Amino acid sequence: MRLLIVRHGDPDYTIDSLTKKGWREAECLAERLAKLEIKDFYVSPLGRAKDTASCTLQKMKREAVECAWLREFHAPIRRPDVEGKEMIPWDWLPQDWTKEERFYQYDHWFEPEVMKEGKVKQEYDRVTRQFDLLLAEHGYRREGHIYRVEQANRDTLVFFCHFGVECVLLSHLLGLSPMVLWHNFCALPSSVTTVVTEERREGIAAFRLNGFGDISHLYAKGESPAFAARFCEDYGSSTERHD
């Protein structure tokens, strides 16, 4: 089985939709996905993800299942250097979060007090539990860190969602701390991440990352990548986002 996790196009967060550029990205993406044989589509209930999906769905004359758990991951924390404001767990200064060794560990990233206060693990478990239920419907039932194959297949499933929740899904499939994914990986708008099962022994499958954050569909159409989700490449870049 193959999973394609798609981040929405360049966002206009003020209206929970896409910028003009985001719509162009969604059209480029639709041309790419329309060439594939796709079993099922799943989409976040948020506007920017639904709008991104709409171009592909209209082109292919298909529908998507809306999943509440695919919305952007929501478990705000109180970042130590920001007073009186709740923050998303993946917007944290490197010089601060990297001091906590447990953040690098799959079995311990949720133990620091800031994570407990934000109930981040509870939300993580809620999302991944729903994700596993869906995978079980498609023939792969989780047992520990692997998946028991109840109905082997080569189906392709597409998930239109958001960066934060994408990292949660990858963390769960690959056994990695989401903190490492949230802070050290960057999935640009409209990017496609591919995860594929490997069944080296009959009935036992593991998921393997085949490609992360691919935006070749943009380059194919001469569309430059959006800067959304990134911070300045060097501090002197006054036109790029610092914080």
Image: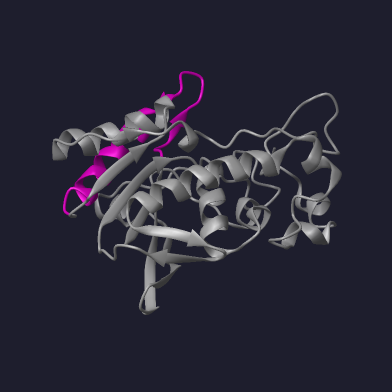
Q: Nearer the viewer, residue 100 or 27?
A: 100
The relative height of residue 147 versus residue 204 in the rendered view (above or below) is above
Can the viewer see residue 242?
Answer: no
Q: Nearer the viewer, residue 152 or 88?
A: 152
- First to last magenta residue range: 8-35
Residue drawn at the location 72% of the way across and 60% of the way down: 107
Can the viewer see residue 126?
Answer: yes
Quadrant in the picture for the N terminus: bottom left
Relative image position of residue 184 (x, y in whole percent):
63, 57
Residue drawn at the location 70% of the way across and 32% of the way down: 76
Q: Is residue 37 left or right of residue 77?
A: left
Is 94 within the magenta? no
Residue drawn at the location 62% of the way across and 62% of the way down: 176
Q: Is residue 91 left or right of residue 203?
A: right
Relative image position of residue 242 (x, y in whole percent):
68, 40
Q: Quadrant of residue 24?
A: top left
Count the marks: how many? 0
Residue drawn at the location 40% of the way across and 46% of the way down: 134
Relative image position of residue 37 (x, y in whole percent):
17, 54
Q: Is residue 32 left or right of residue 77?
A: left
